[in-house]
Amino acid sequence: MSEQKNKIYDVVIVGAGPSGGQCARLLTQKGHKVLIVDRVRDLSLNNFSSAGAPLSILKEFELPKSVVATYWNKLTLVSTNFEKKWISPENKGVVMDFTKLREFLLDEVQKHHGEVKLGWEYKKHKTLGEGSLEISLYNSINKKIENVVTDVLVDGTGSARSITGKRDNPKNYVQGIGLEFIVKTKKEIDSKDFQFFLGYK
């Protein structure tokens, strides 16, 4: 029985959030062989971000209206000492549905022949000859380990820094802490007020 060879990619991206998904989307559109992996099995399970942005983001990143949860025309900043509000008669921004946004990006990756692996997490990598890397991935459901080879490894894990953070000094970074609430209501609320609450620091 012959030994199974590792799959080879131009780029492996770890983390299928908006940054990792958009990176994979652009690379596959340019014809690169891309694998994007994320440890979550279901994108709706960590639908934690409000993904608020200016209206121009839809055109700039060619995003469909299907990823928009709502629009906003008021911006309110609330801090310990003051509150400021800007109001426009027209919509100025969007709050995206984080799950739908990521699903759209990953669908785009697959449409351009990229591969998506959900439920897999990055474990380690090592350098091979000629500068390529061997990446070890782990699936916690079936306890399976899979190795792939790539020329480029991208850390798209955000503040977790699952790849780069393990080799870096944490003193080189400033950590910010935020808190978000997702409130589900029985009926639709037509409030277009996008609010930021700022701590005293």
Image (tube, grey):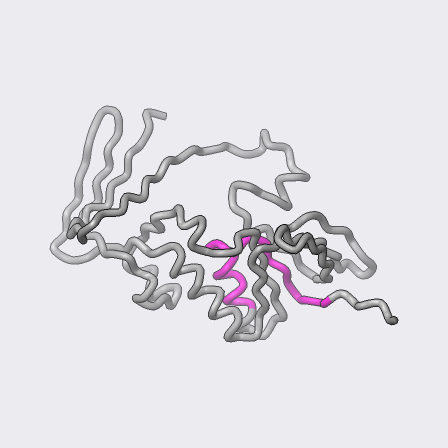
Up-down relation of residue 172 to residue 188 (above or below): above
Q: Which residue is depicted at the point 44% across and 33% down?
A: 176
Q: Position of residue 17 (x, y in %)?
A: 48, 54
Q: In this view of the protein, which residue sits in the foreground, 93 or 138?
A: 138
Where's the C terminus, which quadrant? top left
Which residue is pictured at 73% across the width and 62% down the height? 149
Instruction: Depth check: give the residue in front, 161 or 40.
Output: 40
* Quadrant of the image occupied by residue 162: top right
Q: Residue at x 57, y 70 (%)?
A: 114
Q: Is residue 41 magenta?
A: no
Residue 71 occupies which quadrant of the picture?
A: bottom left
79 with respect to 46 (left or right): left
Up the image or down, 184 lies above or below 117; here it is above
Task: Tell me the quarter of the picture where residue 130 sits.
Answer: bottom right
| Figure check: 118 above or below 76 | below
Give percent across and percent down for residue 82.
Answer: 20, 28
Magenta part of the chain: 7-27
Q: Position of residue 170 (x, y in %)?
A: 60, 32
Residue 128 in view: yes
Residue 73 visible in the snapshot = no
Farthest residue to the right: give it.
Answer: 1
Residue 25 on the magenta span:
yes
**In the foreground, 151 or 15:** 15
Please report the residue visible at 56 percent of the width from the left and 54 percent of the height from the top: 38
Does 162 sit left or right of 44 as displayed? right
Foreground residue among 195 and 143? 143
